[in-house]
Amino acid sequence: MRKILIFSFLAGIAGVLTGCHEETDSVRHTPKSLPGADTISIHLVIQRLDSSLFACRTRTDVEAWVTANPAFVRSYFPEAGKREQLVSELFRRVNEPSLREFYGQTKESFGNFDTLRRELTTAFRHLKAYDPAFRVPEIRLAFTGFLGSDLVLTDSTITIGTDYFLGNKAKFRPDVYGYQLWRYNPKALVPQILFILSEKYVETNRQDKSLLNEMIGYGKAYEFAQTLLPETPDSLLIGYTGKQLAETEIAQDLVWAHLIDNKLLYETNPMKKVKYTGDRPTTFEIGPRCPGSIGRWVGWQIVRFYKEQNPDVTVRELMQNKDARQILELSKYRGQTPES
């Protein structure tokens, strides 16, 4: 009976939320800046490998470009084959009219990359405040018509394939499922980078194979990423539209009831866990309008409630707390909205 109620509820709330647009970004919870972050000076280097590649006119120019960027070539084209083949393919691409037109859309989507620079600077200030040993990586911008990767992060560099992140008006889009395209737009770029960077700082109990532990791990990662860029809308981190977030908040008591009724919090079966934390278009086990990765979102809610109930706990203490059960208990989260 509980699942039937969830299905009908999630189907019915659409009429209540007709004012919420599908593509609206949504932010409700804004973490405070980390102490001292605003006073930290960051020297951010952005290397424009995209513009230097598209400035090449001859095969000799492309060969010189490849020679001049050996570290980038090794990390960005790990499966490109022989050097001669890579040079020939890049030369063909930079002279392809449709690809040059596609590259021209970079200006429309990113402008002069001022927003990217500002967001990364803000994020790195906060990361430096959290971890004084953090070394600001060099940012490399690439554009190859999807020949390379979308993002490549190392300890010293972050390479961004800007061709992946031009948004829904771009001439070409990455070859991914439709529900995954949300992360490939300019607004979502830096939040996705921060989520990846959070992995180094989010500590979990690796012996705990429960769904709850996995949920809390994701929740801590989202919270850490949003702490680095405090104004980041929730939607750009978790990939729900504003409408989906509003619907999910309203229905979270039923989502929680599903997890409890089916004894899922301490489930350890990977095949069952992935249904709630995996990258999917919907969590149809709960309802046709329930977004995918709902377990990640619930984990984020638990972490937020934990912070609200325990205001003296620092961000570092939260990230270092490996006890998922304790975080749940002290959060007092039971599927309620913050106002209830």
Image (cartoon, rainbow, N blue to C red):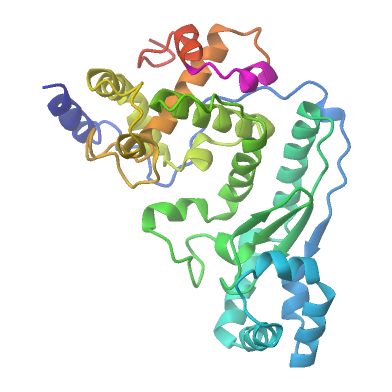
The residue sitting at 17% across, 32% down in the picture is 7
The residue sitting at 69% across, 61% down in the picture is 111
Q: Tell me the chief SS of the magenta region.
A: helix
Q: Position of residue 234 (x, y in %)?
A: 51, 34
- What is the quadrant of the C terminus in the image? top left
Placement of 35 over or under 65, stated as above or below: above
Placement of 148 over or under 253, stated as above or below: below
Which portion, as a residue range, is magenta?
315-324
Front residue of 44/149: it is 149
Q: In the drawing, does residue 196 fall left or right of residue 24?
A: right
> Is residue 12 within the magenta segment?
no
Q: In the drawing, does residue 125 fall left or right of residue 303?
A: right
Can the viewer see residue 220 in this picture? yes
> Is residue 323 within the magenta segment?
yes
Q: Position of residue 226 (x, y in %)?
A: 61, 32
The residue sitting at 26% across, 39% down in the picture is 289
Placement of 263 over or under 40, stated as above or below: above
Q: Quadrant of residue 97?
A: bottom right
- What is the quadrant of the N terminus in the image? top left
Q: In the drawing, does residue 245 fall left or right of residue 29?
A: left
Front residue of 255/10: it is 255
Q: Quadrant of residue 233?
A: top right
Q: How many marks?
A: 0
Front residue of 48/261: it is 261
Question: Residue furthest toward the front?
Answer: 207
Q: Position of residue 136 (x, y in %)?
A: 81, 44
